[in-house]
């Protein structure tokens, strides 16, 4: 059988309520074609059911109505387009490929995040602090950690920072070197690093497909722990193998229900 045949069998099993059987058929499809995107997508939807991350992100915008929003890694622009007209939104990407019209409240800056943060970011927001940020740039822990530290320094203490790709599907799609179209990289290491070195942060990873959406609150813009110890922290967590997640990946990565009421309550907290 080829990948398409296994995939059809998976869909049939899923329709019958046999998720375990559907998962096995998806695994068989990936053995036949290691880059079978639909198989990865189906597995992600089974592992992380409920609204897709774009819907969750839209709901966060609607709930918080931030005056200022920073997005790192805008790609086609579909996520930054979720910012409301009342939000001053700035997107950063070294190679943006905007494919839809954006409002006059949105500014796209062509740069790497390191280049971006080397300039006067506060001036872009009229000297206001960042109230909401979405980090979805390079899928490597050292870059995501640098981005997080830089954003926190510019954020309001009551702000929310969202981190994409923090709940990997499996070992292969969580590797640093990309070998599949479906790929989250090693951003999962960032959650573990923040939990150890910044226990004051409130960290919850919403169980939304395809690879989770972490919500980080209780920020401290004065903290310099991450920026001053960045190389040490990165070296420590790069040494961890994926197997460290063991049988408690949800607990290790602070998995949070993909439920609108519970997410609203999470965002309404101090």
Image: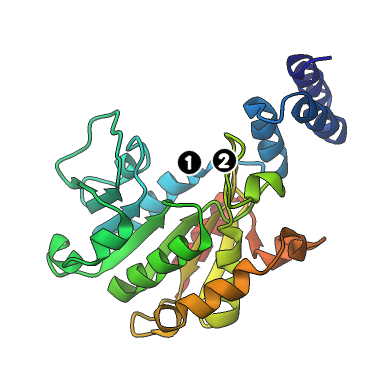
Q: Position of residue 258 (x, y in %)?
A: 61, 50
Residue 66 is left or right of residue 172, and the answer is left
Crowding at dot 2, Cα within 10 Å, few <14 / some 14-19 / many 20+, comes out as some
Residue 106 is left or right of residue 243, and the answer is left
* Disc 2 element: loop
Q: Position of residue 226 (x, y in %)?
A: 45, 79
What colour-coding does the image apply?
rainbow
Question: Which residue corresponds to the image point at 83% horizontal and 24% vertical from the top-left?
Answer: 13
Q: Is residue 71 above or below residue 74?
A: below
The residue where tag 2 is placed is 51
Residue 44 is left or right of residue 263, and the answer is right
146 and 248: which is toward the camera? 146
Q: Quadrant of residue 23?
A: top right
Question: Which residue corresponds to the image point at 63% horizontal and 59% vertical from the top-left?
Answer: 256
177 and 206: which is toward the camera? 177
**Residue 55, label in figure:** 1
Residues at marks 1 and 2 touching, judged by CB atoms closer than 8 Å: yes
Looking at the rendered image, the quarter that the C terminus falls into is bottom left
Q: Position of residue 93 (x, y in %)?
A: 31, 47
């Amino acid at each position: 059988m080829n990948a398409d045949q296994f995939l059809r069998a998976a869909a049939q099993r899923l329709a019958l309520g046999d998720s375990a059987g559907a998962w096995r058929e998806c695994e068989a499809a990936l053995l036949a074609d290691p880059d079978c995107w639909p198989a990865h997508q189906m597995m992600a939807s089974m592992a992380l059911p409920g609204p897709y991350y774009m819907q969750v992100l839209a709901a966060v915008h609607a709930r918080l109505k931030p005056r200022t929003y920073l997005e790192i890694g805008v790609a086609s622009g579909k996520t930054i387009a979720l910012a409301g007209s009342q939000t001053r939104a700035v997107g950063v990407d070294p190679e943006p490929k905007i494919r839809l019209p954006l409002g006059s409240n949105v500014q796209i800056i062509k740069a790497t995040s390191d280049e971006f943060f080397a300039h006067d970011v506060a001036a872009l927001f009229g000297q206001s602090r960042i109230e909401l940020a979405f980090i979805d740039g390079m899928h490597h822990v050292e870059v995501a950690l640098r981005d997080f530290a830089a954003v926190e320094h510019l954020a309001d203490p009551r702000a929310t920072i969202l981190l994409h790709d923090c709940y990997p599907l499996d070992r292969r799609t969580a590797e640093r070197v990309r070998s599949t179209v479906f790929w989250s990289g090693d951003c999962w290491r960032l959650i573990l690093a923040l939990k150890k070195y910044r226990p004051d942060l409130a960290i919850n990873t919403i169980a939304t497909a395809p690879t989770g959406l972490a919500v980080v609150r209780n920020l401290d813009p004065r903290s310099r722990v991450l920026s001053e110890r960045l190389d040490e922290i990165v070296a420590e967590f790069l040494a961890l193998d994926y197997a460290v997640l063991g049988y408690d990946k949800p607990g290790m990565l602070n998995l949070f229900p993909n439920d609108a009421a519970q997410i609203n309550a999470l965002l309404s907290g101090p």
